Amino acid sequence: MSAPITGEPAGGEPIMGGPLGRGPSAGTPDGPSIKAPAGERAGGGSTEDEQAAGGRLRFGYGTNGFANHRLDEALTVIAELGYEGVALTLDHDHVDPFAPDVAKQVGRAADRLRDLGLGVVVETGARYLLDAWRKHAPTLLHDDRGRRLEFLRRACDIGADLGAEAVSFWAGVRPDDVDPDTAWKRLVDGVAEVLGYARTKVGFEPEPGMLVQDIADWRRLRHDLGDPAELGITLDIGHCRCLEDLGVPECVLAVREHLVNVQIDDMRRGVHEHLEFGEGEIDFPPVLRALREADYRGLVAVELPRHSHAAPDVARRSIDFLRGAAAE
């Protein structure tokens, strides 16, 4: 690693006897409504010229940047601003995977996503969802990691019911009382369990300060799992600037075959702080060109989890910036 990192890292029993949506739920007689495939969504098409240029980018926005909005209202604002999808963070106030009425919450979310023509990826980086005292704990690395595994199984079920394009998760920070070898073994075993369970694409996110914090760590994890085709990568563009040795566009192209989820934000070298576009050090037009060159067709979702206090304005500025950068 070429720069020290400051700032903080981001981020049982089966539900009703089995995955959500396999029985009736609120909203429709047969369970949650599932959104149309990407090519059938409003705004989901692309012209021949765009396809020849490497594909049209689809911008989304993370619901963790709308933490003070009800989910239905957040989705409405995001759609009305012109975004084509959302990165839905499962959390207490939006879709709570441990709530008694989780099936109804998922059904309502599926209906609203369909009605608004929004694609969706499922994110699992909520704070204090599993433990009121420890922000992201337990992770796959802790002694008591069972609740994290249950959460990830539920996330996979919810993702399948929503027709999500991917479910994304990360390693977590190694606990002080867990030695590196044990932590790594627990991670490999845990990810293998998730891969064996998931019915959607899985994106594993390198996160600064965590056990898997860069692309090289992700490659090691993938190797130790036997290079499974099911394991994709969630690439946060800001993280590339924060700590990778390669330039940001080169990072995109280095993992082009494995990209299933992209988060986008500005960042400075060595500082893990998600910034609005233009406040960091990233030159975005070459990054967006690299995503098109990579023929990436998934969501490129704005990741600003600490900007909920001004969410509509920040989201408006973000989409305007990205459209301008994409046109250069």
Image (cartoon, helix red, strand yellow):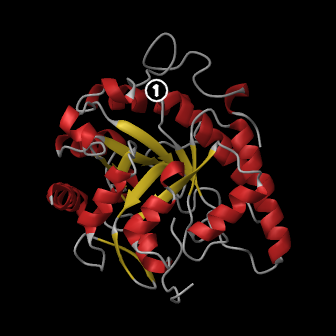
In the figure, residue 291 lies in which quadrant?
A: bottom left
Residue sitting at x 32%, y 35%: 118
Residue at the (83%, 77%) spot, across then down: 179
* Secondary element at tag 1: helix
Three-letter code for the amino acid on which mark 1 is drawn: Gly
What residue is disc 1 on?
107
Residue at image position (81%, 61%) is: 186
Tell me where residue 317 appears, x and y as whole percent: 17, 61
Residue 98 shows up from this direction: no
In terms of depth relative to the viewer, which is nearer, 215 or 266? 215
Q: Position of residue 230 (x, y in %)?
A: 64, 42
* Residue 127 appears in the rendering: yes
Residue 264's x, y, as percent?
36, 61
Farthest front residue? 52
Q: Nearer the viewer, residue 255 or 144?
A: 255
Q: Nearer the viewer, residue 307 or 254?
A: 254
Q: Quadrant of residue 140?
A: bottom right
